[in-house]
Image (cartoon, rainbow, N blue to C red):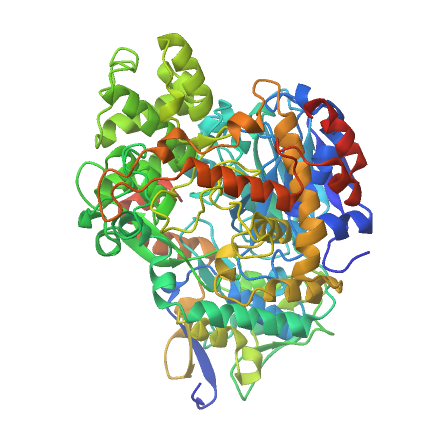
Amino acid sequence: MILGYAGKFLEVNLSTEKIKEVSFDDEILEDYVGGRGLAAKILWDRLGSKWEKIDPLQPENILLFLTGPLTGYFPGGRICVSGKSPQSNGVVGSTVGGEFGVELRCAGYDGIIVTGGAKKPVYLLVKDSEVEIRDAGHVWGKDAKQTVRILTKECREILKKRFPLYGEWKEPAILYIGPAGENKVRTAVVAAKWTHAAGYGGYGAVMGSKNLKAVAIKGTGPLPPVANMKKIERLIQVVNDNAYESELWRRWGTGGGGYEFGAKTSSEPVRNWQNEWHDEKSFGVDQFENRVWIKQSWSDFGCPTCCLKIAMVKNGKFKGAITDNPDYEMQAYLGPNLGIFVPEENVFLSTLIDDLGLCGIQTGNVMGFAAELFQRGILTRKDLDGIELKWGNAEAFANLAKKIALREGIGDLLAEGTYRAALKIGKRKNLDVLQYAVQSKGISIGAHGIRSGKDYPEIISYVCSVQGGDHTSTAGLPLAGGGSELMEIFNDSGVYCNFNSFGIPRNVRFNFYTAVTGLKLTRKEWCSTKALRVLQLQRTMLLLGGPDQKWNPKIHDANPPRFYEPLLSGPYKGKTAEKTAVEEYKRRYYRAVGWDKNGIPKSENLRKLGLQDVNRALENLR
Amino acid sequence: MTKKKEPIWIARELSKCSGCRKCEIACSLFHEKRIWPEASRIRVFMLVPGVEFPHFCSQCEDYPCVQSCPVNALSVSKKTGAVLVNTKTCIACGKCISACPGRIPHMHPNGKYVLICNLCNGDPQCVKVCQEGGWNVLKKISKEDRIYKLYARTPEETTRDLALKIYGEKAEEFL
């Protein structure tokens, strides 16, 4: 057995209520590591032969909660959620912070594989090796804060009753869905605490489709044994010291972005990306810090950065709204993207999105899209069930978000996410509204634009990513460089917070891997074999797609049309992405990762990576 | 860190806790040579998100836990003032947990003996990491003539107080 792993996975079939333990061969763990990499492997092995027919929102889909060998050791614990994505029909390694991954490993498991679907709402309670499927009827329909409150109390009472001599039980770590996930909204998240979310991929809807409201875990064991604990302690110190040097990063988290990515780099979505520049000082981090932050440092297991803060509206009509920072993505997508530049209104919307179990990025994107259609007269007030969806009207957007989460009226259509909603509206109105949809392969683009060229994503970052518009998994060259998707695959497979890897020497993460597992792994080896294997699997499942949407690289390996419109104003006014440059970079990228000119992984490369069955599956697409 | 005259105490400002749990990591590494949050002598509770705080021995003046032990497995360190658990004689009966006004001690996950903070023999590891990170929830001080027992509170009690401090009247909805 490889060191650093608990050595077993929990498999729960919700249809038959059978619970068992499974394990994977050392070679598989060595090749695919954990988290995102292992998710791709498990999904391919179990569903690959019928991938196009698998409906992500039916019991035949598999839902995965996977840790990696670095979870709990590398500062900043996370857990990776995956399955067939109801957004892209491919595979997304969607990670979320919190203590769930650590608790899972302390309970003796590297991950949970959920198959089938329950007949009625249930939740899973795991206490070390004791696992049970429990009724969740009383929390079904409950929002984030009430779900956490009720389940925390209930699970602690159960533990207290069972182990009366133990002393006080700490809370279990809980992953759950809100009303949006229950209603299979494609922009629903799998959430932790009140505000943490695995958003990209839409796995909240998958959980909902399985009638799985939550998973609660309490593990009382240690983290799995490692090869060299002394070395790990030294490496933890390197990561900590690096974080402690960054005063403003720790103080603000990404909360400085709401103003700076607009004013400084012109890369923030403003009114559905009609612009990416604004100079609204009302949205400055100082305003957030001084007016709404009630907790300056909020962090997850082992984190030295504490990029999270807690915000609360103290006065006015949104008084009492409570959420985290909001971080940059929430600031942007529930702020300028909707024409909102007031911190309190932003906190209010962010709170509502959390409470409903929606993804702020994906839902902010589809609401911005709808608002632009309203601005252009394509969607009328009647279409919107009477909502006057004007830019800057926080209450109107709040009403719309509720309708989306509950799939009421227009909300039912927008609950399909921007891409699918655009197709439907286009058909209904007989117009091309896809031109206003800022997404890539069913996944809305994170709040980092490419037109100014001043932010980190490159012109093909979203075009070629196997996770579409995911701003935490952007594609770029060189493949072994910092901007490569292959490095993101490492973060998401080792399963730790990449925010704590900013600024550390690149080899630290591989040294970490070696200290934990005892296995040698260099960046070069990772990028030339293992990560590529994961990339090809993800690319293949993305292209096989189905059942409702399939992607043709010639059409869909593309930036949204909006990115070719010149920026309207600001210091980079007139700048835009250039199609010829994008096509040229795309060709270079295809070559580097071993895809043919049509974007299909080449036979010879797949064979070299030992992926013969993947090669056969792609024959129809060539 | 400046040397403090012994016996010592760990002063605590709970509302500053970020919930990073580095204290649990440091404690379990020191005592167990592993990262083992449930075997940590200091445990961070989060019964309400945002309301994280460390729960650990407050060294009451009258040491009710020591008095309650039926097998004399608990004693007070003359040097540091900490409660020491004799792991060989402890029978894991849980009487000290009931005797503690804050129900602070808890069983080692191995089930064999109870865990109580021993101040790392005068050099508490939790304080180091908390200070290093700049959170300063924990500070080592010389023990003065004060009523430390006030800090022996159950997780529910502390959660209620801190939730009120952080969330005001909204706190009731989360408790």
Q: Is residue A552 left or right of residue A280?
A: right
Q: Nearer the viewer, residue A384 or A599?
A: A599
Q: Nearer the viewer, residue A169 or A420?
A: A420
Regarding residue A205, the answer to whether it shows in the image is no
Residue beneath the point at 45% across and 27% down: A179
Q: Residue B25: horizontal and vertical position, in percent?
A: 57, 66
Q: Quadrant where the N terminus of chain A lies? A: bottom right
Q: Is residue A103 above or below residue A399?
A: below
How many labels were placed on the picture?
0
Q: Is residue A536 left or right of residue A612?
A: left
Regarding residue A611, the answer to whether it shows in the image is yes
Residue beneath the point at 58% across and 71% down: B27
Q: Residue A172: horizontal and vertical position, in percent?
A: 56, 48
Residue beneath the point at 75% across and 33% down: A614
Q: Image quadrant of residue B70?
A: bottom right
Q: Is residue A366 left or right of residue A375?
A: right
Q: Residue A577: horizontal and vertical position, in percent?
A: 38, 39
Q: Nearer the viewer, residue B59 or B50?
A: B50
Q: Image quadrant of residue A210?
A: top right
Q: Residue A435: horizontal and vertical position, in percent?
A: 38, 24
Q: Quadrant where the C terminus of chain A lies? A: top right
Q: Is residue A610 above or below residue A296?
A: above
